[in-house]
């Protein structure tokens, strides 16, 4: 295999996959990735601690998310691949960075999936308090594993209907909320209306009585994770029927969906009740409908929370299976991860992640406090993945400007400043995590985010370094010691490398 070029290695990542995701799947995957527990549940504690200015926080981070999606869209139309971020880092920055990117992305989904699996058990107990969590864990995991092992289309169908449920619930809330707010109706003794934006205790941007002026700015470090998973379109692109047609539509619609679903929901929540009414652990939508006497609608939202968690689990298995196979092809993951079914499913990587989900959920039940730190560490995987998208887009455009490779038909606007702003924001998020973590608790080992940043980052770096030393000899043998990127600033890095032409020109 030492003679195999980088280019053919990139091509090999796509061998065996079926282009079976149609237009409706792609559109709903894009929508569903932008709607999850971060909105349905996580917004409650942020509303309580931040006030109406949370609207500003969601809007600003939404703009960054749009920049991210435009950068990703440019990369996908340069070359659609199920290896996604791993494959782009391999092409533009070399084998070491592809290895780091892949395992950071896997870490993110592995830990997030464990948390979502445990959360499903808690959500079920809303109706059946005595139902054992371990039973819910087994049933939920079995469902998403079977769906993922069937085919990419089965994954797409599940995500389609999950997105329909999530979008439907939000649209119902937006319709009801708009009538209540515009009509200035009474909700449990409180008059709804847009005047609550500034009439809320502390005003629009609270900075007294326990609130800090920098609250809405600091909370952005948490808001960014509400948008996590919008990058799923990049992974799914390798199995789309027509990525060149569907990706631009999905990407361009992201900013409108964020404006309507996230900012619209936050605006109405703030206008309906004082933000002090929203409590951590209780969906703000459940709170509002409960105050309105519509407990049945609160139950619907509770059911949608389960759907959102299952959707996240489904996405986690789908993406990690494909990323692990990309790493396996490059000898950076166990050879076991290369196995695929006849229907084009990388089942081995899916099974590997599902086993981690299972043991992780058990660990979470035994030591929830220890797992909390691990869960926050998953956030680092999100930030790193977003960072890889921005840096790969910057490198791609530089090579295009140098005439090394043809331009993507869907270039991101504002180059290079939008990607620079995105990277600067991600650095800010890491700093803000450390600061907010330090302020969160008087006891050191309860300063979760601070520990994750100050101790977690060096620890992850050490583990990745050790892992690279283990796999490097195999990677060297596999590539013929060609560990660098495919392209230099003037052309192919290795003169005898066959030029990697995007599929649209092949």
Image (cartoon, rainbow, N blue to C red):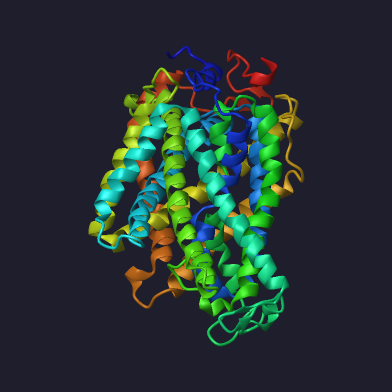
Q: Determine the residue located farthest toward the bottom in the rendered image.
A: 209
* Up/down of 69 relative to 15, above or below: below
Residue drawn at point x = 63 percent, y = 81 percent: 200
Inspect this view and state whether residue 386 appears. Answer: no
Q: How many marks?
A: 0
Query: In the rendering, at what x and y percent does residue 11 appear?
Result: 54, 19
Relative depth, front residue between 236 and 437: 236
Task: Determine the image quadrant of residue 320.
Answer: top left
Q: Nearer the viewer, residue 266 or 332?
A: 266
Query: In the displayed structure, would residue 340 be above or below residue 64?
Result: above
* Residue at 45% from the left image edge and 20% from the top image edge: 479
The image position of residue 506, as x and y in percent, is: 66, 14
**Residue 298 versus residue 4 in the image, above or below:** below
Where residue 357 appears, x then y in whole percent?
A: 32, 44
Q: Quadrant of the N terminus?
A: top left
Give the left or right position of residue 170, taking residue 445 as reference. right
Q: From the top left corner, tell me how far across and down residue 303 is, in percent.
A: 44, 55
The residue nearer to you, when weighing 108 against 167, is 167
Give the residue displayed 45% in from the left and 35% down from the top.
318
Compared across the picture, whether 149 is left or right of 272 comes to left
């Amino acid at each position: 295999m030492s003679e195999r070029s980088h280019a053919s290695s990139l091509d090999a990542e796509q061998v065996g996959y079926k282009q079976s995701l149609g237009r409706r799947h792609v559109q709903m995957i894009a929508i569903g990735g932008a709607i999850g527990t971060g909105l349905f549940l996580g917004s409650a504690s942020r509303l309580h601690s931040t006030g109406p200015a949370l609207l500003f926080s969601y809007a600003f981070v939404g703009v960054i998310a749009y920049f991210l999606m435009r950068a990703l869209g440019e990369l996908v139309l340069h070359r659609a691949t199920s290896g996604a971020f791993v494959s782009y880092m391999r092409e533009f920055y070399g084998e070491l960075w592809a290895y780091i990117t892949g395992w950071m992305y896997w870490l993110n989904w592995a830990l997030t999936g464990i948390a979502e699996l445990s959360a499903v058990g808690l959500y079920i107990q809303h109706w059946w308090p005595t139902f054992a969590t371990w039973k819910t864990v087994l049933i939920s995991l079995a469902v998403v594993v079977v769906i993922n092992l069937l085919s990419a289309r089965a994954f797409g169908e599940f995500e389609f209907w999950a997105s329909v449920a999530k979008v439907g619930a939000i649209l119902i809330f937006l319709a009801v909320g708009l009538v209540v707010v515009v009509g200035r109706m009474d909700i449990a003794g409180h008059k709804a209306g847009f005047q609550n934006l500034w009439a809320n205790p502390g005003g629009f941007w609270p900075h007294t009585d326990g609130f800090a002026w920098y609250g809405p700015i600091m909370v952005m470090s948490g808001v960014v994770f509400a948008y996590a998973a919008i990058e799923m379109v990049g992974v799914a692109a390798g199995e789309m029927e027509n990525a060149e047609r569907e990706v631009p539509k999905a990407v361009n619609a992201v900013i409108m969906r964020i404006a309507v679903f996230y900012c619209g929901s936050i605006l109405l929540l703030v206008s309906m009740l004082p933000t002090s009414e929203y409590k951590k652990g209780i969906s703000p939508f459940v709170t509002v409908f409960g105050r309105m006497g519509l407990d049945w609608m609160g139950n619907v939202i509770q059911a949608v929370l389960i759907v959102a968690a299952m959707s996240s689990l489904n996405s986690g298995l789908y993406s990690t299976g494909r990323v692990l196979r990309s790493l396996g092809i490059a000898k950076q993951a166990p050879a076991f991860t290369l196995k695929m079914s006849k229907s084009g499913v990388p089942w081995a990587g899916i099974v590997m992640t599902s086993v981690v989900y299972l043991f992780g959920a058990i660990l979470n039940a035994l030591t929830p406090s220890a797992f909390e730190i691990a869960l926050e560490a998953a956030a680092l995987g999100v930030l790193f993945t977003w960072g890889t998208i921005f840096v790969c887009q910057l490198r791609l455009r530089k090579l295009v400007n140098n005439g090394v490779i043809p331009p993507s038909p869907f270039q991101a606007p504002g180059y290079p400043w939008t990607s620079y702003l995105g990277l600067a924001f991600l650095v800010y998020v890491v700093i803000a995590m450390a600061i907010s973590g330090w302020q969160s608790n008087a006891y050191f080992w309860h300063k979760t985010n601070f520990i994750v940043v100050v101790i977690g980052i060096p620890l992850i770096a050490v583990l990745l370094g050790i892992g690279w030393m283990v796999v490097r000899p195999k990677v060297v043998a596999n590539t013929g010691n060609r560990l660098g990127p495919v392209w230099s600033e003037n052309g192919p890095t290795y003169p005898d490398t066959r030029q990697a032409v995007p599929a649209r020109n092949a």
